[in-house]
Amino acid sequence: MGVSVMKDLDRKIGFLFHDVARFRTIVFDQLMQPHGLTRAQWWVLAHLGRKDGQTQTDLAERMDLGAVTLSGLIDRLEASGWVERRPDPKDRRAKRVWLTAKVSDLQKAMSRRINEVNKTAMAGLDDEQIEQLIKMLRIIKMNLARAAKANAKTDGTGGRNNNNKKQRRDGTA
């Protein structure tokens, strides 16, 4: 790649990635508002939907949140009846967070809404273009995950970012 192409990549790609993620989140927030969910709450529910029964510590790490912040979110979700904390059978100090049966209809609504967001975002692209985009984004994600892992080993931070939160190094979101 030429120097001028590399110089413009941040303006072209970095801001574009950020703006796409930001607008996607804004649109999803708007669609979830009638369900009474805040962005942080639906984000917790989405993570638990991917892997239910995580410890609060694991969930905080996956979400790149502080333990105190996550605990407050779980308190509110638990008060709404969407999640429940249960003791970890292997570690009496730890609590695991589980989705309740009440959240089933909400998850279906979330799934429908994210499909709406994706349909809106992909308007004007054909199936082949969408598949190619997904393939390219997966490659970019893995390249960056690999770089983050390598940098964490060499920079002495142990994988921590400037906000003193654990960084995800496995490429999951």
Image (cartoon, rainbow, N blue to C red):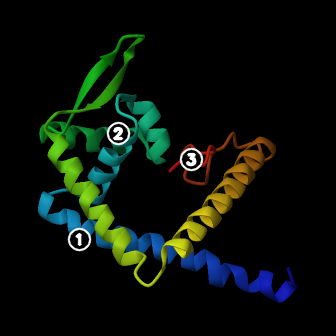
Instruction: Please tell me how crowded label 3 is: few (under 14), some (14-19), or many (20+) other residues with Cα within 10 Å.
Output: few
Question: Mark 3 or mark 1, which has the lower sequence index?
Answer: 1
Q: State the CA–CA distance, disc 3 to disc 2.
A: 23 Å
**Outermost residue toward the right in this view:** 2
The amino acid marked with disc number 2 is Leu
The amino acid marked with disc number 1 is Gln
Instruction: Check if mark 3's residue and mark 1's residue have beta carbons within 8 Å.
Output: no
Mark 3 highlights which residue? 164
Question: Mark 1 or mark 2, which has the lower sequence index?
Answer: 1
The residue positioned 34% from the left and 48% from the top of the image is 46
- Which label lies toward us, 3 or 1? 1
Helix, strand or loop at label 3? It is: loop
Q: Is residue 164 left or right of residue 31?
A: right
The residue positioned 70% from the left and 51% from the top of the image is 148
The amino acid marked with disc number 3 is Asn
List x then y, in percent, for residue 159.
66, 43
The residue positioned 60% from the left and 69% from the top of the image is 132
Q: Is residue 104 left or right of residue 4?
A: left
Helix, strand or loop at label 2? It is: helix
Q: State the CA–CA distance, disc 3 to disc 1.
A: 31 Å
Image mark count: 3
Q: State the CA–CA distance, disc 1 to disc 2.
A: 21 Å
Mark 1 highlights which residue? 30
**Residue 116 has which mark?**
none
Question: Mark 3 or mark 2, which has the lower sequence index?
Answer: 2
**Residue 48 has which mark?**
2
Between residue 122 and residue 89, name the one nearer to us: 122
Against 32, residue 98 (above or below) is above
Q: Is residue 19 left or right of residue 98?
A: right
Between residue 152 and residue 118, name the one nearer to us: 118
Between residue 75 and residue 147, name the one nearer to us: 147
